Amino acid sequence: MEKYNFKKIEAKWRKYWEKNKFYQAEDFSKKPKYYCLIEFPYPSGEGLHVGHTRSYTAMDIIARKRRMEGYNVLHPIGWDAFGLPTENYAIKTGVHPKIVTKKNTDTFRRQLKSLGFSFDWSREINTTDPEYYKWTQWIFLQFYKKGLAYKKKMPINWCFSCKIGLANEEVIDGRCERCGGETEKREKEQWMLAITKYADRLLKDLDPPAGGLDYLEKIKIQQKNWIGRSEGAVIKFSISNPPAGGQFSINVFTTRLDTIFGCTYLVVAPEHEIIKNLELKIKNLGEVKKYIDQTKKKSDLQRTELAKEKTGVELKGIKAINPFNNEEVPIFVADYVLASYGTGAVMAVPAHDERDYDFAKKYNLVIRESVSGGNITKQAFVNDGILINSGQFDGMTSEKAREEMTKWLEKNKFGKKTIQYKLRDWIFSRQHYWGEPIPIIHCNKCGEVPVSEKDLPVKLPDVKKYEPTDTGESPLANIKNWVNVKCPKCGGQAKRETDTMPNWAGSSWYYLAYPLSRKNYKLQTANHKLLKYWMPIDWYNGGMEHTTLNLLYSRFWNKFLYDIGVVSTSEPYKKRTSHGMILGEDGEKMSKSKGNVVNHDDVVANFGADAFRLYQMFMGPFSQAIPWDSRGIEGTKRFLGKVWDISQTKNISDKINNKELEKLLHKTIKKVSEDIEDMNFNTAVSCLMIFINKCYELNDLPKEIWEKFLIILSPFAPFVAEEIWEKLGNKKSVFMESWPKYNPKLIIDDVFEMVIQINGKVRDTVSVKKDISQKEAEDIALSREKVKNWIKGGKIKKTIFVPNRLINILI
RNA sequence: GGGCGAGUGGCGGAACGGUUUACGCGUAGCACUCAAAAUGCUAUGGGAGCAAUCCCGUGUGGGUUCGAAUCCCACCUCGCCCACCA
């Protein structure tokens, strides 16, 4: 008997699939298309992470099943290769990022191939390929043309030790992601993308009636919270004693207009323009300026730590008028009010807002109740209630009052109904080398000039040094012969933009690049029909951590490209699911420093790709985080060994019949088919195991049953399934077979284990015919010795009968 | 502070109103072997008992129900994401 030699088997089929271009998707095939997508990896120096491969295995199983169901499946792969770690490595070693990327992608490719994923390698993409980022830049220019890419002074996170500006996502707990040093907010001109212009559609299209996407509910919820829509009103508070000849006011945004009679002061953010505009009127300007300076100096870390303790200073000498009651209220500046949300100013209602309550207590300010229902001597009452102390609005419910007060506001032109979003525009500039250059030229005469589309791509220049400059500009700023160019408009001296794009740029449209990858990615009309054929993506799986990053960004880009007529669907993804993280064996997040990283090559060498794939599916619920267990994989290897032994030692023939096994097969087909669709891979594997345990007991197996089993096993363990399939004498690959259907008639049992309960406790079980009546069940139950013993002395009050399940006798 | 999710054997987990612990790991005993590994067979929640059998068990405390791991209420613990969003 030949032993299960996974090394030999896996090498053989790997070669076979590659040589026969097995998994290439056909453009415009007559079969129905199915586009399934995984998040393409960032090719880091550490090699493939098991976190990647668990979700890749899952999608690979789905892709393989779909092919067998008759679909023309696009299951592509590529590299999201721009990014900081590669640049940092280049800074350290002096090796060009291009070379590092090449080396890393080679490793990743080899590792992915070793695991037998059915990717269409003919469509491999790489975001750092100039032919690719040409189109990333082209999309940027379209944003620019429509006014959705613009420059703005923005506070960025400045890392003192790296001398570099960091994006928000590069700052963890106020510290620099790469060196762990403290960061501070600094103002810098940044390129922005106006994602907020799409906030409303990004929100509405999630659900009917406007849209309706098949995303996991928690993903929708997270996107909704991130977009953070809130309805309210903007109210204009005039300054009561403006400088002669001027008229000044402060606009505040509130969702609780009903509490406005409880407003006892205003608070503005330190950056608010009113401070500059009324400098001459502010009597304690020195104190105010000092406070503002202190706030600026606060690092992100300090701000986070001090979040609870509120500070502020009154702007003495100016007051504002509440339009509802013409009352004069003092104005404070405080950094708990954010410049970037709403109008950068709030009306403070200490009686009905916790933050205002804290602040008012600390500075001894008036707390006036205007909504009844709480006890404001103890704490702020933040719920809705009945209005009091509110003039003509007294007695109304909060809800009614908001309506009426908004009407009053609009009629008297003191403000209007407004919708606010938490979502901010996307800071699109990075001061790094290893990213797509932003295709803009700055000319002294003409100002900002976009690079002409025919001059794309703006290629990254080859350099020796990648360190950031002392000024915080991108390393590109040091490369004189690249920076200095002629202005495309006037021909005069001009400079290139030296900021590059964030690594989210290339991944915001990569799903469009796969269909086009054989045509140089050309996004224009000539290729429209390719996108029309393949889009939208039918199933996209990825990590929860990308819900508000890649997932939201790419929905935004797709919508924009839809608006300008490049793509044919306004949403890129029909369905989105997510996977749980794989933790280290110690239950901690896997990281090199903790030394708990699982090495793919070792696992494949010791257990084989099939066992590895199977274990990743079997280890636990797909959507949940789960620690790696190096012993667990022994079990799936043992299982494959059993499958192999059965194929080698049992008498498998089409002359054999086995009704019982046939029934089990059909149950298994049903369960595996359904579990794959629901991503319950762990239970799918367990029922494959149950089937094999049964086969192992037998000496003779019907060939047809065994073959069907191999087909449903094949997406999980493609190598061993192919090998056994071939050994059975089949000439064509197992993946050319169609997915088996179960026969509903065959899975019905004709007997069942009836549970007999007495007073709700299980006292006996008995195997009986299916579909017996209550009367029959009672008779059977009462004839049992055990039951008789329990009933002895008691009287039967009632029996509860659940057909085909149990009978409960109450005495 | 807010949002999402999870607490079941020694461990990963099944079950998601109806026999708690499917499947796998681990452990113990047995078989094969000179021996080991591999493999196979048997057992394996806790307690009492020679046994049949009984009692107790799904984070804690209540509730609904003939019946609750599952539904409802309150609480505790853990994980992830967001966080002064007016």
Image (cartoon, helix red, strand yellow):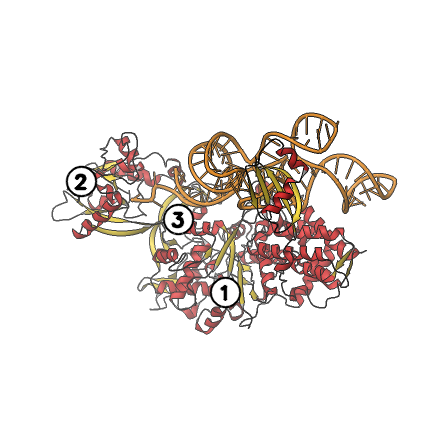
In the rendered image, the quadrant that contains the N terminus of chain A is: bottom right
Mark 2 secondary-structure assignment: strand
The answer to whether tags 2 and 1 share a subunit is yes
Using the image as rendered, state which of residue A805 and residue A558 is in the foreground.
A805
Q: Is residue A29 left or right of B51 when viewed as pictured?
A: left
Q: CA distance from mark 3 to mark 2?
A: 37 Å
Q: Residue at x 49, y 58 (%)?
A: A575
Mark 2 or mark 1: whose residue is earlier in sequence? 2
Mark 3 secondary-structure assignment? helix
Mark 3 / mark 2, whichever is N-terminal: 3
Label 3: which residue? Answer: A225
Query: Residue A462: horizontal and vertical position, in percent?
Result: 50, 60
Determine crowd level at label 1: few under 14, some 14-19, many 20+ residues with C-alpha closer than 10 A.
Answer: many
Q: Chain of mark 1?
A: A
In the depicted structure, whether residue A577 falls above or below residue A276? below
Q: Nearer the viewer, mark 3 or mark 2?
A: 3
Tell me residue A70's x, y (percent).
59, 67
- Circle 2 sits on which residue? A318
- Specify the farthest residue to the left: A244
Q: Amino acid at mark 1?
A: Ala
Q: Nearer the viewer, mark 1 or mark 3?
A: 3
Q: Is A205 displayed left or right of A53 in the figure?
A: left
Q: Chain of mark 2?
A: A
What's the chain of the residue with tag 3?
Answer: A
The amino acid on which the numbered mark 3 sits, given as a three-letter code, is Asn
Q: Which residue is mark 1?
A: A513
